[in-house]
Image: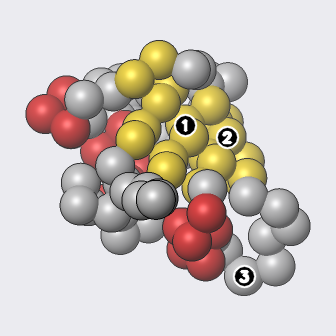
């Protein structure tokens, strides 16, 4: 199945070389969960602060078991600070 992974801000560096922009379409196995993709791209909870699937928040404790489906959009943001 195909999903779109969008990494924002400094996480874009973790996308495959040659990726244009902040998104890449991935071909993943059926049964793949959010946590599987985050692990593949070395995105632990400390780095993957905000995770959305199709615009819906996925809490850190739910990521390991949150299933992905064909056509899903997985978006990840790092922690942000401002002042």
Instruction: Mark yes or no: residue 40 visible.
Output: no
Instruction: Specify whether 14 is left or right of 80.
Output: right
Q: Which of 27 and 44 is in front in this view?
A: 44
Q: Which residue appears at 47% of the width and 17% of the height?
A: 56
In the image, residue 59 lies at what x, y percent? 25, 29
- Answer with mark 1 or mark 3, whichever residue precedes in sequence: 3
Using the numbered discs, state the Cα–Cα distance from disc 1 to disc 2 in whole angstroms. Answer: 6 Å
Q: Label 2 crowding class (10 Å Cα cut-off): few <14, some 14-19, many 20+?
A: some
Classify mark 1: helix, strand or loop. Answer: strand
Instruction: Mark yes or no: residue 55 visible.
Output: yes
Quadrant that contains the N terminus:
top right
Q: Are marks 1 and 2 in contact (CB under 8 Å)?
A: yes
Using the numbered discs, state the Cα–Cα distance from disc 1 to disc 3 in whole angstroms. Answer: 19 Å
Q: How many marks?
A: 3
Which residue position holds label 3?
17
Q: Which residue appears at 29% of the width and 45% of the height?
A: 35
Q: Label 3 crowding class (10 Å Cα cut-off): few <14, some 14-19, many 20+?
A: few
In the image, residue 13 lies at what x, y percent? 61, 77
Classify mark 2: helix, strand or loop. Answer: strand
In the image, residue 74 lies at what x, y percent? 55, 37
Q: Which residue appears at 24% of the width and 54% of the height?
A: 45
Instruction: Specify whether 5 is left or right of 56.
Output: right
Q: Which residue lies furthest to the bottom in this view?
A: 17
Q: Label 1 crowding class (10 Å Cα cut-off): few <14, some 14-19, many 20+?
A: many
Q: Is residue 64 above or below residue 46?
A: above
Which residue position holds label 2?
4
Q: Which numbered disc covers residue 28?
A: none
Which residue position holds label 1?
74
- Answer with mark 1 or mark 2, whichever residue precedes in sequence: 2
Q: In this view, does 14 lie above or below 47?
A: below
Q: Do the residues labelled 1 and 3 touch (CB within 8 Å)?
A: no
């Amino acid at each position: 199945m195909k999903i779109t992974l969008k990494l924002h801000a400094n996480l874009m560096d973790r996308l495959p070389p040659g990726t244009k922009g902040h998104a890449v379409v991935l071909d993943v196995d059926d049964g793949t969960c959010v946590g599987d993709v985050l692990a593949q791209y070395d995105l632990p909870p400390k780095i993957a602060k905000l995770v959305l699937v199709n615009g819906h928040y996925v809490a850190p404790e739910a990521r390991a078991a949150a299933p992905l489906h064909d056509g899903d959009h997985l978006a990840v943001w790092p922690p942000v600070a401002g002042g």
